Amino acid sequence: MERFILWVANHLPKPLRNLYFRYEDLILYLIFGGLTTVVSFVTQFVPAYFLGTGAAATIFCTTFSWICAVTFAFFTNKKYVFKSKTATKRAFWTEFFSFYGARLVSYFLELGIMLVFATWLGLNYYVVKICAQVFIVLSNYLFSKLFVFKKREDGETAGEGK
C-alpha cells in the first residue's frame, strides 16, 4: 500500500506532487479518515436498520461503530499517516491505549450529538451522523498529531521509550 501511495504521488503533476509531499500526513489522514468514516457508517447503519433508532439502539450502534472505526483508524494512522514505528511491545501498547484514550473523547462527543440531536430532538438520524463526523475527524486529527503519534526530538514517536 505504501508503495502504491508513493507511486501515485510521484506520478502527479509537479505542483500537485509538491503540494502532496508538503501536506502528506494531512492528505493521508483525510483519505484514511474517509475510509474510517465508511467503516463507521456501515457499522452504525447496518445494526440500526435491524435494531431501530431508539436510545438503547443508538447507544449500542454508536458504541459498536466506534470500536470498529477506532480499531481501523489506529492501524491505518499508525502505519500510513504518521508512519509510527514502535520498537517494543510496551511502546506499541502505550501508543495503542493513548490512541483509544484520545478517541474516547470523540466517542462521548459523538454519542452526545447522536442522542441530543437524533434521538431527543428528532432530527434525521443519518444527517446528524454525517454532521457529527465533521467534528470527530477534526478533533481526532489534532489528538493524533499532537499527542498520540507526536514525534520527539530524537525522531521516535511519543509511544516509544528508551
Image (cartoon, grey):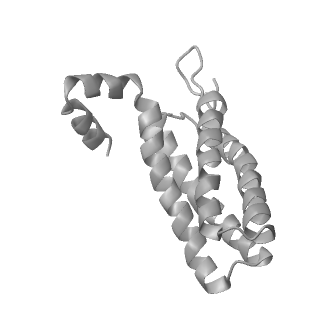
Residue 51 sits in quarter: bottom right
Residue nearest the observer in this picture, 130 or 144 = 130
Q: Is residue 132 visible?
A: yes
In the displayed structure image, the side of residue 146 where residue 13 appears, left or right = left
Q: Residue at x 59, y 47 (%)?
A: 134
Q: The C terminus lies in which quarter of the figure?
A: top right
Q: Is residue 87 above or below residue 108?
A: above
Say above or below: 85 vs 105: above
Identify the image quadrant of residue 110.
bottom right
Direction bottom: furthest residue: 50
Question: Is residue 29 shown left or right of residue 64?
Answer: left
Q: Position of residue 58 (x, y in %)?
A: 72, 72
Which residue lies at the image location 46% right of the left edge and 51% below the top edge?
A: 34
Residue 79 appears in the figure = no
56 relative to 14 in the view: left or right? right
- Position above or below: 106 against 55: above
Whole-percent x, y for residue 17 in the image: 27, 27
